[in-house]
C-alpha cells in the first residue's frame, strides 16, 4: 500500500452530492428521486402554461379499426379450408374481439378531437383542459392522436416497466413524461385533472376509476372532478354498480359521482357543460403555478 506521506499526487475530487449517481440511485437517495418526479414535471407544466387537464383512461390493447381489421384478415387466411389449430383459433377469437372493441379507439380519438377544438377556443392565457393519457398505445394513443389532429397540446404520463412501453408519437414532445414511481404518476394524473373519461379497459383502468371515485366520495378533493364512464354495454357486463347500492356498500347518491356515455357527442356535451359550469363560470385568480388539486386538510 502506498504511503500517503510519500505520494505527491493530489487526491481525486469527490463527486458533488447532487451529481453522485451512486448515491442518487441508492436506497438513501430515494427521497430525492421522488422529489424530482414532483419538481421536474411541475417545472415543465409551468413553462408550457398548462392550467388543467382532462384525463383519458382505457385499455392499451385496442387498435384502430383499420389495424384490427388487417390483423383479423391475416389470421383468418381467406381461402384456407383447413381448420386452424387450437392456439391459432384463440388468436382468431381475440382478433375478432379486437375488431369489435376497435370502435372505442375511434370514439376516444373523436372525443379528444372535439374536446381539444373546444378548449382551444376558451379565452385564457394558459392551456385549459388539455387531453392527458398514460402515454402508451391503445386508448391512450387514440386520445393523444385526436388532440394532435385538433392542433392542441397533449400530455403523456408514461411509466417505466420491465417490458418496454414506448410513448406514442402523438404526444407533444415537451409534455412527454416518464415516471419510475407509480404513485407519483398517479399524483400527476389527479393534480391538474378537472375531468376523467374512462373507456373500456382492464385492471389498470379499473384501478384509476375507483381511486378517483374514492377520493371524490370521501371528499378528499376540494374541486369537482367529472367522471365520464364510456360504453354502457361493456361496463354493465363488468361491474354491477347497482349491486353496491343493494348490498349497502355505497349509498345511492354515490352513483351521482359519475355519468355514463355511449357516443363521443354525448360524452362531449357532459364534459363541456360540466367544465363550463364548475371551472369556467367561476371567479379565477391567476397563479404562477398550475392550478393544483386542493385537498381538505
Image (cartoon, grey):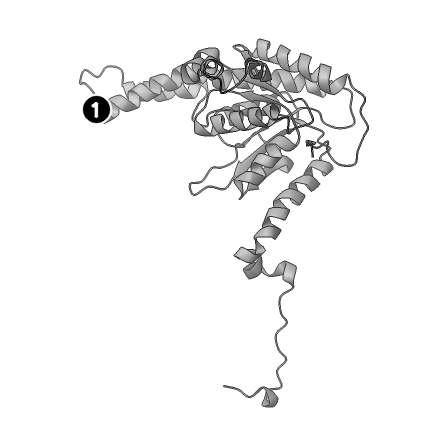
Work out which quarter of the rendered image holds the C terminus and state it: top right
- Label 1 neighbourhood size at 10 Å, few (<14), some (14-19), many (20+)? few
For the question of whether residue 30 can be seen, the reply is yes
Using the rendered view, name the quadrant where residue 195 is placed: top right
Residue nearer the viewer, 294 or 264: 294
What is the count of numbered marks?
A: 1
| Residue at position x 49%, y 20% in the image | 249
Residue nearer the viewer, 175 or 254: 254
Callout 1: SS: helix
Residue nearer the viewer, 191 or 93: 191
Using the rendered view, name the quadrant where residue 220 is placed: top right
For the question of whether residue 144 can be seen, the reply is no
* Mark 1, residue position: 86
| Residue at position x 38%, y 19% in the image | 98
Residue sitting farthest toward the front: 248
| Residue at position x 53%, y 86% in the image | 2
Using the rendered view, name the quadrant where residue 239 is placed: top left
Judged left or right of residue 105, residue 257 is right
Q: Position of residue 135 (x, y in %)?
A: 54, 32
Q: Position of residue 30 (x, y in %)?
A: 57, 52
Residue sitting farthest toward the bottom: 6
Q: Is residue 237 above or below residue 190?
A: above
Q: Position of residue 288 (x, y in %)?
A: 79, 36
Residue nearer the viewer, 151 or 59: 59
Q: Position of residue 14 (x, y in %)?
A: 62, 69
Amino acid at each position: 500500500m502506498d504511503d500517503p506521506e510519500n505520494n505527491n499526487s493530489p487526491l481525486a475530487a469527490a463527486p458533488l452530492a447532487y451529481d453522485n449517481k451512486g448515491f442518487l440511485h441508492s436506497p438513501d437517495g430515494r427521497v430525492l428521486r421522488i422529489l424530482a418526479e414532483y419538481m421536474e414535471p411541475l417545472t415543465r407544466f409551468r413553462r408550457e402554461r398548462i392550467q388543467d387537464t382532462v384525463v383519458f383512461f382505457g385499455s392499451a390493447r385496442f387498435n384502430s379499426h383499420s389495424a384490427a381489421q388487417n390483423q383479423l384478415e391475416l389470421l383468418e387466411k381467406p381461402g384456407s379450408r383447413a381448420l386452424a389449430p387450437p392456439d391459432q383459433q384463440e388468436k382468431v377469437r381475440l382478433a375478432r374481439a379486437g375488431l369489435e372493441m376497435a370502435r372505442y379507439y375511434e370514439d376516444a380519438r373523436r372525443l379528444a378531437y372535439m374536446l381539444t377544438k373546444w378548449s382551444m377556443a376558451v379565452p385564457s392565457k394558459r392551456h385549459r383542459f388539455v387531453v392527458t393519457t398514460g402515454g402508451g398505445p391503445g386508448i391512450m394513443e387514440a386520445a393523444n392522436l385526436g388532440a394532435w389532429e385538433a392542433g392542441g397540446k397533449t400530455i403523456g404520463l408514461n411509466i417505466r416497466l420491465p417490458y418496454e412501453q414506448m410513448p406514442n408519437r402523438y404526444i407533444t414532445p415537451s409534455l412527454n413524461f416518464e415516471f419510475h414511481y407509480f404513485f407519483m404518476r398517479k399524483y400527476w394524473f389527479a393534480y391538474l385533472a378537472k375531468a376523467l373519461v374512462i373507456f373500456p379497459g382492464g385492471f389498470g383502468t379499473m384501478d384509476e376509476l375507483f381511486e378517483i371515485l374514492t377520493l371524490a366520495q370521501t371528499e378528499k378533493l376540494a374541486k369537482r372532478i367529472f367522471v365520464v364512464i364510456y360504453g354502457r354495454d361493456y361496463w354493465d357486463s363488468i361491474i354491477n354498480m347497482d349491486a353496491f347500492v343493494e348490498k349497502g356498500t355505497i349509498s345511492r347518491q354515490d352513483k351521482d359521482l359519475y355519468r355514463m356515455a355511449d357516443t363521443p357527442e354525448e360524452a362531449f356535451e357532459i364534459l363541456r357543460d360540466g367544465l363550463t359550469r364548475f371551472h369556467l363560470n367561476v371567479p379565477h385568480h391567476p397563479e404562477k403555478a398550475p392550478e393544483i388539486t386542493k385537498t381538505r386538510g
